[in-house]
Amino acid sequence: MILYLLKQNKNSKSAAYGKFFAFPVIEETVTLDGLAEHMSSHNTPYSRGAIKGMLTDMVLCIKELLLEGKNVKIADLAIFSLGIRNNGGAVSEDVFSVTKHIKGGKLRARATGELIAKSLNLEATLKKASATSKATSGNDNGNNSLTPDPSPEGEGGENGGGGDNTNVNPNPNEGGGDDNGGGDEPGADED
């Protein structure tokens, strides 16, 4: 079950200004130790320690391969790749400077197989989070509040409870990303 909160778009320049969008509530972040413990509880002959060692090595190897300019695909999870965060553009190739025009790198992950939107939409159910839940908003604004930070000033309305279970929207192109209040701002990080 995916809990969600509603957040109003406060960007007056957006075509979606004033509209409300759902954002996931994150109940817990599972660490590598927690993942190893969880995996060891699934009737495996491998201990938590052996699993943690494999996962730790996997993380190091993925980083190494990404820094060599390769993408890493883990079936039914994601394709990991590196992107470049640009800092504006140069007027010509001659004046381009790495230190002036590149902010840094970023990790990208694109869902594959069982985690693509179409598959998730068939399996997931949504429920509006109650204001008394101990979970935090997916846009971790540092205050562990259920009220997401809908604007730079942190203003926003009261997020009430609710108990409606709703299947995920079968159209993955509606209600997320772009400039409608979800995802990154368009043009902020060019690849």
Image: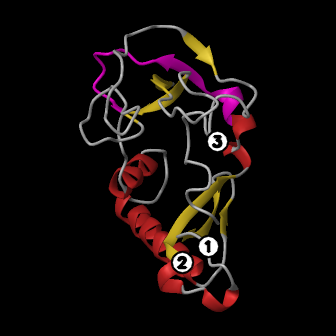
Instruction: Assess whether residue 54 is covered by the magenta stretch.
Output: no
Which mark identifies residue 7? none
Q: Quick check: marks 1 and 2 in contact, CB under 8 Å?
A: yes
Of circles 3 and 2, the one toward us is: 2
Measuring from the top left, give residue 129's x and y in whole percent.
Answer: 41, 18
Q: Nearer the viewer, residue 186 or 72?
A: 186
The residue most toward the bottom is 94
Q: Residue at x 33, y 56 (%)?
A: 33
Q: Give amino acid for label 2.
A: His
Name the residue beneath numbered marker 1. 89
Q: Give amino acid for label 3.
A: Asp
Q: Residue at x 61, y 73 (%)?
A: 89
Name the residue beneath numbered marker 2. 101
Badge 1 element: loop
Instruction: Find the magenta span and give its range.
Output: 120-136
Left or right: 154 as drawn, with respect to 7:
left
Crowdedness near tag 2: few (<14), some (14–19) or many (≥20) residues, C-alpha within 10 Å: some
Measuring from the top left, give residue 31's x and y in whole percent.
Answer: 35, 53
